[in-house]
Amino acid sequence: MAHDATDILISGGGVAGLTAAAAFGAAGFRVTCVDPAPPVTSDTDAGADLRTTAFLQPSIPVLQAAGLWDRLEPFATPLQVMRIVDAGGAEPQARITRDFNSADISDQPFGWNLPNWLLRREMVARLADMPNVDFRPGTGFASMVPRESGAIVTLTDGSHIHTRMVVAADGRNSPVREALGIATRTTRYGQKALAFAVTHPIPHGNVSTEIHRSGGPFTLVPLPDRDGLPSSAVVWMERGPEAERLAGLPVPEFEAEMTLRSCGLFGPLTLATRRPLWPMISQIAARFHGPRTALIAEAAHVVPPIGAQGLNMSLSDLRVLLELASATPEQIGEPAMLTAYHRRRWPEVQARVAGIDLLNRASMLEPRPLRDLRAGALNALYSLAPVRKTLMRAGLGVR
Ligand SMILES: Cc1cc2nc3c(=O)[nH]c(=O)nc-3n(C[C@H](O)[C@H](O)[C@H](O)COP(=O)(O)OP(=O)(O)OC[C@H]3O[C@@H](n4cnc5c(N)ncnc54)[C@H](O)[C@@H]3O)c2cc1C
Protein backbone atom coordinates (compact mmCIF):
# COMPACT_ATOMS: atom_id res chain seq x y z
CA MET A 1 0.00 0.00 0.00
CA ALA A 2 1.34 3.50 -0.84
CA HIS A 3 1.60 5.86 2.13
CA ASP A 4 2.33 9.54 2.51
CA ALA A 5 6.03 9.92 3.24
CA THR A 6 7.90 12.39 5.39
CA ASP A 7 11.35 12.69 6.96
CA ILE A 8 10.18 13.63 10.45
CA LEU A 9 6.79 13.04 12.03
CA ILE A 10 6.31 15.22 15.10
CA SER A 11 3.62 13.99 17.47
CA GLY A 12 2.39 17.04 19.43
CA GLY A 13 1.78 20.66 18.46
CA GLY A 14 2.40 22.24 21.87
CA VAL A 15 5.06 24.92 22.13
CA ALA A 16 7.83 22.29 21.92
CA GLY A 17 6.35 20.42 18.94
CA LEU A 18 5.64 23.59 16.96
CA THR A 19 9.18 24.86 17.59
CA ALA A 20 10.57 21.50 16.49
CA ALA A 21 8.47 21.61 13.30
CA ALA A 22 9.77 25.10 12.43
CA ALA A 23 13.37 24.15 13.29
CA PHE A 24 13.49 20.90 11.27
CA GLY A 25 11.58 22.63 8.46
CA ALA A 26 14.11 25.48 8.39
CA ALA A 27 16.90 22.87 8.25
CA GLY A 28 15.37 21.53 5.02
CA PHE A 29 13.66 18.34 6.24
CA ARG A 30 10.16 17.34 5.19
CA VAL A 31 8.11 17.60 8.38
CA THR A 32 4.61 16.51 9.35
CA CYS A 33 3.31 17.70 12.73
CA VAL A 34 0.10 16.26 14.16
CA ASP A 35 -1.98 17.19 17.21
CA PRO A 36 -5.58 16.18 17.98
CA ALA A 37 -6.22 19.53 19.73
CA PRO A 38 -6.13 22.57 17.43
CA PRO A 39 -3.93 25.30 18.97
CA VAL A 40 -5.73 28.04 20.91
CA THR A 41 -4.23 31.35 19.77
CA SER A 42 -6.09 34.00 21.82
CA ASP A 43 -5.93 34.57 25.59
CA THR A 44 -9.70 35.07 25.90
CA ASP A 45 -10.63 31.58 24.60
CA ALA A 46 -11.67 29.11 27.31
CA GLY A 47 -8.90 26.64 26.40
CA ALA A 48 -6.09 29.23 26.23
CA ASP A 49 -2.75 28.26 27.79
CA LEU A 50 -2.26 31.17 30.21
CA ARG A 51 1.23 30.10 31.26
CA THR A 52 4.11 32.18 30.04
CA THR A 53 7.54 31.02 29.03
CA ALA A 54 10.70 32.81 30.04
CA PHE A 55 13.16 31.96 27.27
CA LEU A 56 16.65 32.02 28.74
CA GLN A 57 19.63 33.15 26.67
CA PRO A 58 20.70 29.73 25.28
CA SER A 59 17.20 29.16 23.84
CA ILE A 60 17.35 32.20 21.57
CA PRO A 61 19.71 30.73 18.90
CA VAL A 62 17.34 27.74 18.59
CA LEU A 63 14.41 30.09 17.98
CA GLN A 64 16.51 32.14 15.55
CA ALA A 65 17.49 29.08 13.54
CA ALA A 66 13.81 28.10 13.39
CA GLY A 67 12.98 31.53 11.93
CA LEU A 68 10.81 32.28 14.97
CA TRP A 69 12.70 34.86 16.98
CA ASP A 70 12.07 37.78 14.58
CA ARG A 71 8.35 37.18 15.01
CA LEU A 72 8.48 36.73 18.78
CA GLU A 73 10.91 39.43 19.88
CA PRO A 74 8.47 42.37 19.41
CA PHE A 75 6.14 40.75 21.99
CA ALA A 76 8.82 39.71 24.50
CA THR A 77 9.44 41.37 27.87
CA PRO A 78 13.12 41.31 28.88
CA LEU A 79 14.03 39.91 32.31
CA GLN A 80 16.93 41.95 33.62
CA VAL A 81 16.85 41.09 37.32
CA MET A 82 15.77 37.93 39.16
CA ARG A 83 14.74 38.74 42.72
CA ILE A 84 14.39 36.01 45.34
CA VAL A 85 12.44 36.92 48.47
CA ASP A 86 12.09 34.78 51.57
CA ALA A 87 8.78 35.46 53.29
CA GLY A 88 8.78 32.61 55.79
CA GLY A 89 7.45 34.36 58.96
CA ALA A 90 3.98 34.00 60.53
CA GLU A 91 2.56 36.57 58.08
CA PRO A 92 3.95 36.92 54.54
CA GLN A 93 6.59 39.60 54.91
CA ALA A 94 9.72 40.04 52.85
CA ARG A 95 12.45 38.93 55.31
CA ILE A 96 15.37 38.45 52.97
CA THR A 97 15.67 39.80 49.44
CA ARG A 98 18.44 38.96 47.01
CA ASP A 99 18.84 40.23 43.46
CA PHE A 100 20.61 38.53 40.57
CA ASN A 101 21.34 41.20 37.97
CA SER A 102 22.01 39.87 34.52
CA ALA A 103 24.47 42.75 33.98
CA ASP A 104 26.86 40.91 36.37
CA ILE A 105 27.42 38.10 33.87
CA SER A 106 26.32 39.35 30.47
CA ASP A 107 25.36 42.40 28.41
CA GLN A 108 22.05 40.69 27.63
CA PRO A 109 19.00 40.13 29.86
CA PHE A 110 18.61 36.69 31.51
CA GLY A 111 15.74 35.95 29.25
CA TRP A 112 12.58 37.13 27.56
CA ASN A 113 9.04 36.34 28.69
CA LEU A 114 6.18 35.51 26.32
CA PRO A 115 2.63 34.19 26.84
CA ASN A 116 2.19 30.58 25.63
CA TRP A 117 -1.00 31.34 23.65
CA LEU A 118 0.91 34.03 21.72
CA LEU A 119 3.79 31.63 21.06
CA ARG A 120 1.31 29.22 19.48
CA ARG A 121 -0.19 32.01 17.33
CA GLU A 122 3.18 33.10 15.95
CA MET A 123 4.49 29.56 15.51
CA VAL A 124 1.43 28.40 13.57
CA ALA A 125 1.79 31.47 11.32
CA ARG A 126 5.46 30.61 10.71
CA LEU A 127 4.60 27.00 9.76
CA ALA A 128 2.03 28.26 7.25
CA ASP A 129 4.92 29.93 5.38
CA MET A 130 6.94 26.71 5.09
CA PRO A 131 6.05 24.54 2.08
CA ASN A 132 7.99 21.55 3.45
CA VAL A 133 6.07 21.54 6.76
CA ASP A 134 2.63 19.96 6.93
CA PHE A 135 0.85 20.91 10.18
CA ARG A 136 -2.31 18.87 10.76
CA PRO A 137 -4.26 20.18 13.76
CA GLY A 138 -7.21 17.94 14.61
CA THR A 139 -5.34 14.71 13.80
CA GLY A 140 -3.29 12.81 16.38
CA PHE A 141 -0.83 9.94 16.63
CA ALA A 142 -2.61 6.59 17.10
CA SER A 143 0.04 3.85 16.74
CA MET A 144 3.30 2.99 15.00
CA VAL A 145 5.18 0.07 13.54
CA PRO A 146 8.96 0.67 13.51
CA ARG A 147 10.81 -0.87 10.59
CA GLU A 148 14.44 -1.07 9.50
CA SER A 149 14.27 1.98 7.22
CA GLY A 150 11.62 4.01 9.02
CA ALA A 151 8.31 3.71 10.82
CA ILE A 152 4.73 3.45 9.63
CA VAL A 153 2.61 5.72 11.78
CA THR A 154 -1.17 5.41 11.93
CA LEU A 155 -2.99 8.65 12.66
CA THR A 156 -6.33 9.11 14.44
CA ASP A 157 -8.09 9.75 11.10
CA GLY A 158 -7.08 6.23 9.99
CA SER A 159 -4.43 7.44 7.52
CA HIS A 160 -0.86 6.07 7.47
CA ILE A 161 2.39 7.89 7.00
CA HIS A 162 5.90 6.58 6.42
CA THR A 163 8.53 8.54 8.35
CA ARG A 164 12.26 8.16 8.88
CA MET A 165 12.04 9.48 12.44
CA VAL A 166 9.27 10.15 14.97
CA VAL A 167 9.78 13.04 17.40
CA ALA A 168 7.55 12.60 20.44
CA ALA A 169 6.60 16.08 21.69
CA ASP A 170 3.18 14.96 22.87
CA GLY A 171 3.36 16.01 26.50
CA ARG A 172 3.71 14.43 29.93
CA ASN A 173 1.36 11.51 29.10
CA SER A 174 3.02 11.02 25.69
CA PRO A 175 1.02 8.51 23.60
CA VAL A 176 4.18 7.75 21.56
CA ARG A 177 6.16 6.96 24.72
CA GLU A 178 3.33 4.70 25.93
CA ALA A 179 3.06 2.97 22.54
CA LEU A 180 6.79 2.14 22.77
CA GLY A 181 6.46 0.96 26.39
CA ILE A 182 9.13 3.39 27.70
CA ALA A 183 8.80 3.65 31.48
CA THR A 184 9.01 6.88 33.51
CA ARG A 185 10.09 7.75 37.03
CA THR A 186 7.53 10.14 38.48
CA THR A 187 7.47 12.14 41.73
CA ARG A 188 4.16 13.65 42.82
CA TYR A 189 4.48 16.60 45.19
CA GLY A 190 0.83 16.95 46.19
CA GLN A 191 1.16 20.56 45.02
CA LYS A 192 -0.73 22.45 42.37
CA ALA A 193 0.16 25.69 40.61
CA LEU A 194 -2.29 28.43 39.71
CA ALA A 195 -1.14 30.21 36.53
CA PHE A 196 -2.72 33.55 35.59
CA ALA A 197 -1.98 37.21 34.78
CA VAL A 198 -2.41 40.25 37.04
CA THR A 199 -2.18 44.01 36.77
CA HIS A 200 -0.67 46.17 39.53
CA PRO A 201 -0.03 49.86 40.23
CA ILE A 202 3.72 49.54 40.96
CA PRO A 203 5.83 48.88 37.80
CA HIS A 204 7.82 45.64 37.68
CA GLY A 205 10.89 47.31 36.15
CA ASN A 206 11.68 44.08 34.22
CA VAL A 207 12.35 42.31 37.52
CA SER A 208 11.16 38.72 37.92
CA THR A 209 10.26 38.12 41.58
CA GLU A 210 10.09 34.71 43.31
CA ILE A 211 8.61 34.89 46.83
CA HIS A 212 9.25 31.79 48.92
CA ARG A 213 7.05 30.62 51.75
CA SER A 214 6.02 27.15 52.92
CA GLY A 215 3.65 25.55 50.40
CA GLY A 216 5.72 26.71 47.45
CA PRO A 217 6.95 29.80 45.64
CA PHE A 218 4.81 32.67 44.34
CA THR A 219 6.47 34.02 41.19
CA LEU A 220 5.71 37.20 39.24
CA VAL A 221 7.25 37.41 35.77
CA PRO A 222 7.05 40.70 33.80
CA LEU A 223 4.59 41.07 30.93
CA PRO A 224 3.87 44.10 28.70
CA ASP A 225 1.38 46.63 30.10
CA ARG A 226 -2.25 45.54 30.00
CA ASP A 227 -5.15 48.00 29.85
CA GLY A 228 -2.57 50.76 30.46
CA LEU A 229 -1.35 49.15 33.71
CA PRO A 230 1.86 47.25 34.60
CA SER A 231 1.20 43.51 34.29
CA SER A 232 2.85 40.26 35.38
CA ALA A 233 2.33 36.54 34.88
CA VAL A 234 1.91 34.73 38.20
CA VAL A 235 2.66 31.12 39.07
CA TRP A 236 1.42 30.38 42.59
CA MET A 237 2.32 26.95 43.96
CA GLU A 238 0.53 25.57 47.02
CA ARG A 239 -0.39 22.20 48.49
CA GLY A 240 -3.26 20.69 46.47
CA PRO A 241 -6.25 21.40 48.77
CA GLU A 242 -5.09 24.98 49.43
CA ALA A 243 -4.59 25.61 45.71
CA GLU A 244 -8.11 24.32 45.04
CA ARG A 245 -9.55 26.52 47.77
CA LEU A 246 -7.83 29.55 46.24
CA ALA A 247 -9.01 28.67 42.72
CA GLY A 248 -12.62 28.56 43.98
CA LEU A 249 -12.60 31.86 45.94
CA PRO A 250 -14.72 34.79 44.72
CA VAL A 251 -12.43 37.18 42.81
CA PRO A 252 -12.27 40.01 45.44
CA GLU A 253 -11.26 37.52 48.17
CA PHE A 254 -8.74 35.87 45.86
CA GLU A 255 -7.24 39.27 45.03
CA ALA A 256 -6.93 40.11 48.73
CA GLU A 257 -5.17 36.77 49.42
CA MET A 258 -2.76 37.08 46.52
CA THR A 259 -1.90 40.68 47.43
CA LEU A 260 -1.05 39.47 50.96
CA ARG A 261 0.95 36.53 49.57
CA SER A 262 2.91 38.91 47.30
CA CYS A 263 3.94 40.84 50.45
CA GLY A 264 2.33 43.89 48.79
CA LEU A 265 5.52 44.37 46.76
CA PHE A 266 3.60 45.61 43.70
CA GLY A 267 0.61 47.16 45.50
CA PRO A 268 -2.89 45.62 45.23
CA LEU A 269 -2.98 42.88 42.55
CA THR A 270 -5.94 42.68 40.14
CA LEU A 271 -6.76 39.36 38.44
CA ALA A 272 -6.71 39.82 34.63
CA THR A 273 -7.41 36.26 33.38
CA ARG A 274 -8.85 32.90 34.46
CA ARG A 275 -6.78 30.96 37.05
CA PRO A 276 -6.31 27.37 35.84
CA LEU A 277 -4.66 24.75 38.09
CA TRP A 278 -1.64 22.61 37.10
CA PRO A 279 -0.68 19.51 39.16
CA MET A 280 3.02 19.53 40.05
CA ILE A 281 5.16 16.51 39.26
CA SER A 282 8.67 15.80 38.25
CA GLN A 283 9.18 13.01 35.76
CA ILE A 284 11.90 11.57 33.58
CA ALA A 285 11.57 8.87 30.92
CA ALA A 286 13.87 5.87 31.43
CA ARG A 287 15.36 6.58 28.03
CA PHE A 288 14.91 9.37 25.51
CA HIS A 289 14.78 7.08 22.48
CA GLY A 290 12.93 4.08 21.11
CA PRO A 291 12.96 2.40 17.70
CA ARG A 292 13.03 5.22 15.09
CA THR A 293 11.91 7.65 17.83
CA ALA A 294 13.32 10.51 19.93
CA LEU A 295 11.47 11.84 22.98
CA ILE A 296 11.72 15.58 23.64
CA ALA A 297 10.21 18.16 26.01
CA GLU A 298 7.54 16.99 28.49
CA ALA A 299 7.33 13.60 26.78
CA ALA A 300 10.89 13.13 28.09
CA HIS A 301 10.95 15.25 31.27
CA VAL A 302 8.67 17.35 33.49
CA VAL A 303 9.77 19.67 36.30
CA PRO A 304 7.90 22.09 38.58
CA PRO A 305 8.00 25.66 37.23
CA ILE A 306 10.98 26.90 39.24
CA GLY A 307 13.76 28.87 37.57
CA ALA A 308 12.07 28.76 34.13
CA GLN A 309 13.74 25.47 33.25
CA GLY A 310 10.98 23.38 31.62
CA LEU A 311 10.76 24.57 28.05
CA ASN A 312 14.35 25.75 28.04
CA MET A 313 15.44 22.14 28.69
CA SER A 314 13.15 21.15 25.82
CA LEU A 315 14.85 23.55 23.43
CA SER A 316 18.20 22.05 24.42
CA ASP A 317 16.79 18.63 23.46
CA LEU A 318 15.86 20.12 20.13
CA ARG A 319 19.25 21.80 19.64
CA VAL A 320 21.09 18.50 20.14
CA LEU A 321 18.69 16.55 17.93
CA LEU A 322 19.03 19.15 15.17
CA GLU A 323 22.82 19.11 15.40
CA LEU A 324 22.86 15.33 15.02
CA ALA A 325 20.30 15.36 12.19
CA SER A 326 22.13 18.10 10.29
CA ALA A 327 25.53 16.38 10.71
CA THR A 328 24.30 13.14 9.10
CA PRO A 329 20.92 13.81 7.47
CA GLU A 330 20.94 10.42 5.75
CA GLN A 331 21.05 8.72 9.17
CA ILE A 332 18.13 10.38 10.93
CA GLY A 333 16.22 7.99 13.12
CA GLU A 334 18.94 5.33 12.96
CA PRO A 335 20.07 3.66 16.20
CA ALA A 336 23.52 5.38 16.30
CA MET A 337 21.97 8.84 16.04
CA LEU A 338 19.24 8.15 18.59
CA THR A 339 21.69 6.62 21.06
CA ALA A 340 23.97 9.65 20.69
CA TYR A 341 20.98 11.91 21.42
CA HIS A 342 20.11 9.95 24.56
CA ARG A 343 23.72 10.01 25.79
CA ARG A 344 24.06 13.75 25.30
CA ARG A 345 20.75 14.69 26.94
CA TRP A 346 19.75 12.16 29.60
CA PRO A 347 22.51 12.75 32.21
CA GLU A 348 22.17 16.53 31.96
CA VAL A 349 18.36 16.41 32.21
CA GLN A 350 18.57 13.96 35.11
CA ALA A 351 20.86 16.40 36.99
CA ARG A 352 18.50 19.31 36.39
CA VAL A 353 15.41 17.32 37.42
CA ALA A 354 17.22 16.38 40.66
CA GLY A 355 18.30 20.01 41.29
CA ILE A 356 14.82 21.42 40.76
CA ASP A 357 13.34 18.67 42.94
CA LEU A 358 15.66 19.79 45.74
CA LEU A 359 14.77 23.47 45.29
CA ASN A 360 11.08 22.64 45.28
CA ARG A 361 11.35 20.57 48.47
CA ALA A 362 13.32 23.37 50.17
CA SER A 363 10.67 25.81 49.05
CA MET A 364 7.87 23.71 50.63
CA LEU A 365 9.54 23.39 54.04
CA GLU A 366 7.10 24.05 56.88
CA PRO A 367 8.72 23.68 60.36
CA ARG A 368 10.24 26.90 61.62
CA PRO A 369 13.88 25.76 62.08
CA LEU A 370 13.89 24.47 58.51
CA ARG A 371 12.35 27.66 57.20
CA ASP A 372 14.99 29.67 58.99
CA LEU A 373 17.63 27.38 57.57
CA ARG A 374 16.24 28.04 54.08
CA ALA A 375 16.33 31.79 54.69
CA GLY A 376 19.88 31.51 56.01
CA ALA A 377 20.97 29.40 53.07
CA LEU A 378 19.47 31.84 50.60
CA ASN A 379 21.20 34.70 52.37
CA ALA A 380 24.59 32.99 52.44
CA LEU A 381 24.38 31.79 48.85
CA TYR A 382 23.30 35.00 47.28
CA SER A 383 25.66 37.23 49.26
CA LEU A 384 28.74 35.66 47.71
CA ALA A 385 29.41 37.16 44.31
CA PRO A 386 31.37 34.18 42.83
CA VAL A 387 28.72 31.71 44.03
CA ARG A 388 26.04 33.95 42.60
CA LYS A 389 27.72 34.08 39.24
CA THR A 390 28.13 30.30 39.15
CA LEU A 391 24.51 29.79 40.14
CA MET A 392 23.32 32.31 37.59
CA ARG A 393 25.31 30.67 34.84
CA ALA A 394 24.07 27.22 35.89
CA GLY A 395 20.51 28.53 35.85
CA LEU A 396 21.01 29.84 32.36
CA GLY A 397 22.66 26.68 31.16
CA VAL A 398 25.73 28.76 30.20
CA ARG A 399 28.90 26.77 30.71
C1 LIG B 1 2.44 26.78 35.58
C2 LIG B 1 3.61 26.51 34.68
C3 LIG B 1 4.51 27.53 34.33
C4 LIG B 1 5.62 27.27 33.49
N1 LIG B 1 6.53 28.26 33.21
C5 LIG B 1 7.63 27.99 32.44
C6 LIG B 1 8.65 28.98 32.15
O1 LIG B 1 8.55 30.15 32.56
N2 LIG B 1 9.71 28.64 31.36
C7 LIG B 1 9.85 27.37 30.87
O2 LIG B 1 10.85 27.08 30.17
N3 LIG B 1 8.91 26.41 31.10
C8 LIG B 1 7.82 26.70 31.89
N4 LIG B 1 6.89 25.72 32.15
C9 LIG B 1 7.02 24.45 31.48
C10 LIG B 1 6.49 24.58 30.07
O3 LIG B 1 5.25 25.24 30.04
C11 LIG B 1 6.33 23.21 29.49
O4 LIG B 1 7.61 22.61 29.50
C12 LIG B 1 5.84 23.24 28.07
O5 LIG B 1 4.72 24.03 27.89
C13 LIG B 1 5.50 21.85 27.67
O6 LIG B 1 5.44 21.84 26.33
P1 LIG B 1 5.24 20.51 25.53
O7 LIG B 1 5.07 21.00 24.14
O8 LIG B 1 6.27 19.51 25.86
O9 LIG B 1 3.89 19.86 26.10
P2 LIG B 1 2.34 20.31 25.90
O10 LIG B 1 2.19 21.78 25.87
O11 LIG B 1 1.60 19.53 26.94
O12 LIG B 1 2.03 19.79 24.46
C14 LIG B 1 1.76 18.45 24.16
C15 LIG B 1 0.84 18.41 22.97
O13 LIG B 1 0.67 17.05 22.58
C16 LIG B 1 -0.63 16.92 22.12
N5 LIG B 1 -1.07 15.53 22.08
C17 LIG B 1 -1.73 14.81 23.01
N6 LIG B 1 -2.05 13.60 22.51
C18 LIG B 1 -1.55 13.55 21.24
C19 LIG B 1 -1.57 12.56 20.21
N7 LIG B 1 -2.17 11.38 20.36
N8 LIG B 1 -0.97 12.86 19.04
C20 LIG B 1 -0.36 14.05 18.83
N9 LIG B 1 -0.34 15.02 19.78
C21 LIG B 1 -0.92 14.77 20.97
C22 LIG B 1 -1.47 17.78 23.07
O14 LIG B 1 -2.73 18.13 22.46
C23 LIG B 1 -0.55 18.98 23.25
O15 LIG B 1 -0.83 20.04 22.35
C24 LIG B 1 5.80 25.96 33.00
C25 LIG B 1 4.90 24.94 33.34
C26 LIG B 1 3.82 25.20 34.19
C27 LIG B 1 2.88 24.08 34.58
Image: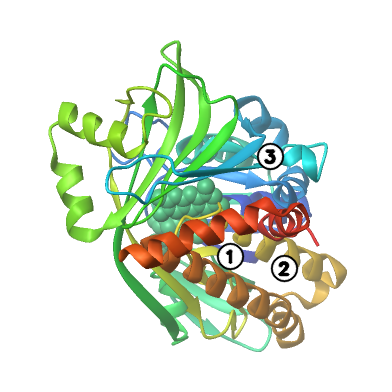
Tag of residue 68: 3
Q: Answer left or right for 260 relative to 85.
A: left
Q: Answer left or right for 27 relative to 293.
A: right
In this view, 64 is above or below 384: above
Task: Identify which residue, 348 or 318, lies in the foreground.
Answer: 348
Q: Which residue is mark 1?
A: 9
The answer to which of marks 1 and 3 sits earlier in the sequence is 1
Are the residues at dot 1 and dot 2 in contact (C-beta closer than 8 Å)?
Answer: no
- Where residue 26 appears, as percent x and y from the top left, is 75, 49
Q: Identify the residue at image location x=60%, y=70%.
A: 352
The answer to which of marks 2 and 3 sits earlier in the sequence is 3
Q: Which residue is mark 2?
A: 321
Q: Nearer the viewer, mark 1 or mark 3?
A: 3
The three-letter code of the residue at mark 3 reads Leu
| SS assignment at label 2 | helix
Query: Could you tell me if residue 51 is visible in this image?
Result: yes
Q: CA distance from mark 1 to mark 3?
A: 20 Å
Q: Nearer the viewer, mark 1 or mark 2?
A: 2
Q: Residues within 10 Å of mark 2 (few under 14, many from 20)?
A: many
Task: Identify which residue, 36 or 244, lies in the foreground.
Answer: 244
Task: Identify which residue, 232 or 370, lies in the foreground.
Answer: 370
Farthest right residue in view: 327
